[in-house]
Image (tube, rainbow, N blue to C red):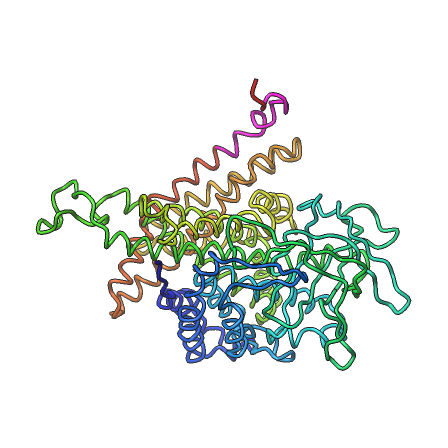
Amino acid sequence: MPQYTPPVRDTRFVLDKVLKLDRYAGLPAFAPATPDVVNAVLEEGGRFVAEVLFPINHSGDQQGCTRNADGSVTTPDGFKEAYSQFVESGWGTLSAPEQFGGQGMPHVISTAFQEYMISANMAFAMYPGLTHGAISALLVKGSPEQQAKYLPKMISGEWGGTMNLTEPQCGTDLGLIKTRAEPNADGSWSITGTKIFISAGEHDLTENIIHLVLAKTPGAPDSSKGISLFVVPKVLVNEDGSLGARNAVSCGSIEHKMGIHGNSTCVMNYDGATGWLVGEEMKGLAAMFIMMNAARLGVGLQGLGVGEVAYQNAVQYAGDRRQGRALTGAAEPEEKADTLFVHPDVRRMLMEAKAMTEGLRALCLWGGLQVDLAHAAESEEERQLADDLVGLLTPVIKGVGTDAGYKVATDSQQVYGGHGYIAEWGMEQYVRDARIAMIYEGTNGVQAMDLVGRKLAANGGRAVQALFRIVGEEVAAAKGKPELASLAEALEKANGQLQAATMWFMANGMKDPNQVAAGAYSYMQLMGIVAIGLMWLRMADAAATALAEGGDDRAFLEAKLVTARFYAERIMPDAGALRRKIEGGAESIMALSPEMFRAA
């Protein structure tokens, strides 16, 4: 059976030494995040997920969710009890606004806890995760009355929440939705339609579920411009806040899927269900993107979380399993065989996993910090920069993070050899769970198109120019430090490749949009290499500084420097190949007719 230890030491290193959270202590938004409180969140939160959530991960996968004859859904054994402990301990309230019962902690701190929760039990983590996506939309677009009615109990965890976007005939192209909203005399709306792939759509963890549903109103354009957003509670809420009658919304079935079996992914039927407009009519797309962007950062964390737990188990197995001898001679002659650690190809997989998970952790936490600074930084210039970086890096964190998480999971499975294919070892579950993160909340190809189609050109390219400037300035500063010089030079080259690819898009995209679309995925990967490379430059700088100051965790710090060098030598060179793929253009991709793809 697998095991999991929350990486508290590494999280602290990033928060304290790389992001240097203490420099924001004077900002009101960071006041609750004192060092003692942050340490308590990491330690106690890590203990909670390891002791309560992780033990029901494998069993929850094996048992799955059950739809009952009355349309209700029962979650796996232990989930309801664990969720009650989650709510009682207040873990879901960490970064929620205090005015609605939250703790008001910075988003970056809740990001750290969410990683641990995902590693321990991804399927369970999705229940509060979907609620947070709905909360984020109501906080921005909900009326004061809607916020007062729904947010306190959603934030406390007493009520759940969902996002209802997808329908059988449409996923990414939401302009094709058929769900209809008809106005009622009392100002409410009647919602009718079917939604699919609705994570946490029906379950027994909470007494109510607040669905946010996309629908079209009468006379609305038959396109994405005609979409409106509605709040549709599973159980209607009376004026005094008590629960009333059951609404006309039900779970038609549970999807049979590859992984995340412990989460109820539902087909939801709305049969004239009562709902209320959120924001303005036919302005649902903007509200949807608030939910989607929050969810996309969360899905990027899923890549990291599953990759981390898979990597931990691969390291443990490599140290226990004895097979063959080191090519340079027996490492342990007294044993019949050496451990897997003597084999360079096993080490290659483990080093790639270590470099990507630790790099992604830093990137996700930096992204969480930018979410905070976009609202809380002192100056308008700082707030704008943070907001620009969040917008630019969200598709990168989601796309590159989940691609990397899946690769780490499959490579970790590979370390086990044949045992990795056997369910009792747990590795095949991580592969199955990780796979969905590359698909939902916008496939990674869609993330790439969002990056090159929307984010690059936004505000005249202000965000990507800011990233280039940040990387350039930090590379220049690092070149003067002998222990960082080679890493800085490698990052400078990768950043140059990214800049050149950006210029190639500018020169060729206007003439033929397919030139940009054909290179979008490679461009997203290239930006990921640079963004994670920036994190490794920062981590190496922090580690070198700590060592020079006599840091007492020398093995941990020295491992940071070696892993940074590995990233520079074995991962950053891919930047050149990705640029050449981009400049290969669209001609060969688009040349064949659909008939020519089919076998003779």
- Near-viewer residue (567 or 473): 567
Q: Nearer the viewer, residue 279 or 534?
A: 279
Toward the viewer: 562 or 352?
352
Find the residue positioned furthest to the bottom. Answer: 240
Q: Which residues are magenta?
A: 581-597
Q: Quadrant of residue 235?
A: bottom right
**Quadrant of the image occupied by residue 68:** bottom right
Please say whether residue 209 is one of the residues in the magenta stretch. Answer: no
From this viewpoint, which residue is outermost toward the left? 334
Instruction: Specify the principal SS of the magenta part.
Output: helix
- Residue 92 drawn at (x, y percent): 55, 72
Q: Is residue 516 above or below residue 350?
A: above
**Left or right: 448 as drawn, with respect to 563:** right
Q: Residue at x 51, y 65 (%)?
A: 369
Report whether 204 appears left or right of 188.
left
Taking 543 as reference, is 22 above or below it?
below
Q: Residue at x 66, y 35 (%)?
A: 510
Viewer-proximal residue among 342 and 161: 161
Left or right: 397 in relation to 183: left
Q: How many marks?
A: 0
Q: Quadrant of the N terminus?
A: bottom left
Q: Residue at x 48, y 60 (%)?
A: 60
How far across and how far down the image is residue 41, in percent? 45, 75
Where is residue 289 drawn, in percent x and y?
67, 56
Quadrant where the C terminus sits is top right
Q: Residue furthest top?
A: 600
In the image, 565: left or right of 74? Answer: left
Residue at the farthest right position: 185
